[in-house]
Image: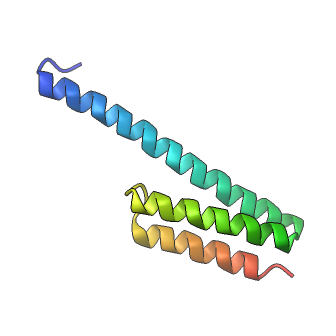
């Protein structure tokens, strides 16, 4: 642990932000998995419903700086393409 007060604060702030970012990333991954399981099951209605939720979570993560905007856009595009490909 650091000795200087400002360094101690930076350590604590970094831990807080890391935990927040990890929680947001985890939520996004969970939503993506829900879309992928619906696609695997061939349930287009469920896939589309979970896609909307996943897109919302990905956009929130991008707006908070957890994901770069291009990364978020790529994730949304790949999910949308997969959902549209379901028969």
Q: In the picture, which quadrant includes the N terminus?
A: top left
Q: Is residue 83 left or right of residue 76?
A: right
Q: Is residue 56 left or right of residue 7?
A: right
What is the number of callouts on the image?
A: 0
- The quadrant holding residue 81 is bottom right
Q: Relative to residue 3, is residue 26 depicted above or below?
A: below
The color scheme shown is rainbow
Q: Which residue is at a point 61% across and 53% down the rendered structure image?
A: 29
Q: Is residue 8 left or right of residue 17?
A: left
**Residue 47 position in % (x across, y down):** 78, 68
Q: Which residue is at a point 77% across and 82% down the rendered structure image?
A: 85
Q: Which residue is at a point 53% across and 62% down the rendered structure image?
A: 58
**Residue 41 position in % (x across, y down):** 88, 64
Q: Is residue 47 left or right of residue 52?
A: right
Q: Relative to residue 4, is residue 28 depicted above or below?
A: below
Q: Relative to residue 15, is residue 70 depicted above or below?
A: below
- The quadrant holding residue 79 is bottom right
Q: In the picture, which quadrant includes the C terminus?
A: bottom right
**Residue 83 position in % (x across, y down):** 74, 76
Q: Which residue is at a point 44% across and 62% down the rendered structure image?
A: 62
**Residue 7 position in % (x across, y down):** 16, 28
């Amino acid at each position: 642990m650091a000795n200087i007060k400002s360094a101690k604060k930076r350590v604590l702030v970094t831990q807080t932000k890391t935990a927040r970012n990890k929680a947001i990333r985890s939520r996004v991954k969970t939503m993506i998995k829900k879309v992928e399981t619906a696609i695997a099951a061939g349930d287009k209605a469920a896939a589309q419903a979970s896609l909307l939720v996943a897109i919302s979570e990905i956009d929130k993560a991008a707006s908070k700086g957890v994901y770069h905007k291009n990364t978020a856009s790529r994730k949304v595009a790949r999910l949308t393409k997969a959902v549209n490909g379901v028969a």
